[in-house]
Amino acid sequence: MVKTIAIDGPSASGKSSVSKGVAQELGYLYSDSGSLYRGVTWQALRKGVDVQDAAAVVECMYEAEWDFFVQEGATIFSIDGDVPVQELREKDVRESVAFVAAIPEVRKFVVESLRSLAAFGSLVMEGRDIGTVVFPDSPYKFYLDADPKERAMRRYRELIAAGEDEKADEVMKSLQQRDKIDSTRKTDPLVVASGAQVIDSTSMTLEEVVRTVVNAVKEK
Ligand code: CDP
């Protein structure tokens, strides 16, 4: 039977590393729902669409050809034949994605696309609304959290390691702004799903968090 493991939480709470680790341990596919919101944002930006213009973003999203497939244990997608990866993490996308992800029609398209990925097999999917909206019936729901300062430091170190020229206090501000938009938006805000196990990773290692999730899944 296909299983879907939902891992939700705010930015830089460790969702990506944990989800990849859990997927590897269990032999499931890793699926990054945020990359789809980033993909819609990237497509709008490269087409010169104003990301504040919801109708134009939605039109641009539907005009594009989206294909979903599996590569190296993960679900990925192409947009008009291109597979953006590094581009999705760039600053212009990072700063606009929370606005784009607040557009109800964008969420509808992404949620439907995410559900269709279960056809590829069992998934570990990370995001903001996986346990609340995408797979609400899944018995495997986790909400990862960490202290905001710790999250900002983690994101800062990631950006510096990726060769970006960023200041720690600006990373903190941008993260706080995204947290605020994500948890206060009208459609599918970031909340703890009912039945989700909350894990505060502030002082846990990655291995400890992965182990906690894998054990909880095996116990069900
Ligand atoms: O890596 P990080 O947590 O910073 O971001 P992400 O998971 O790639 O998500 C980027 C943005 O997409 C978030 O700030 C949300 O605005 C949006 N998102 C969402 O609304 N729902 C999801 N399931 C996943 C992401």
Image: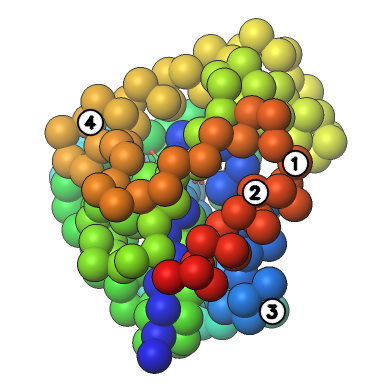
Of pointers 2 and 4, the one earlier in the residue sequence: 4
The residue located at (41%, 26%) in the rendering is 179
Q: Which residue is mark 3?
A: 72
Q: Which residue is mark 4?
A: 185
The residue located at (33%, 66%) in the rendering is 139
Ligand 1 lies in which image quarter? Answer: top left
193 with respect to 66 (left or right): left
Secondary element at tag 1: loop
Badge 3, how many Cα within 10 Å: few under 14, some, many 20+? few
Image quadrant in which the C terminus is located: bottom left
Image quadrant in which the N terminus is located: bottom left
Badge 4, how many Cα within 10 Å: few under 14, some, many 20+? some
Q: Which residue is mark 1?
A: 205
Mark 1 or 4, closer to the camera: 1
Q: How many marks?
A: 4
Q: Amino acid at mark 4?
A: Arg
Whole-angstrom CA distance, mark 1 to mark 2, is: 6 Å
The location of residue 78, given as percent across then percent down, is: 50, 72
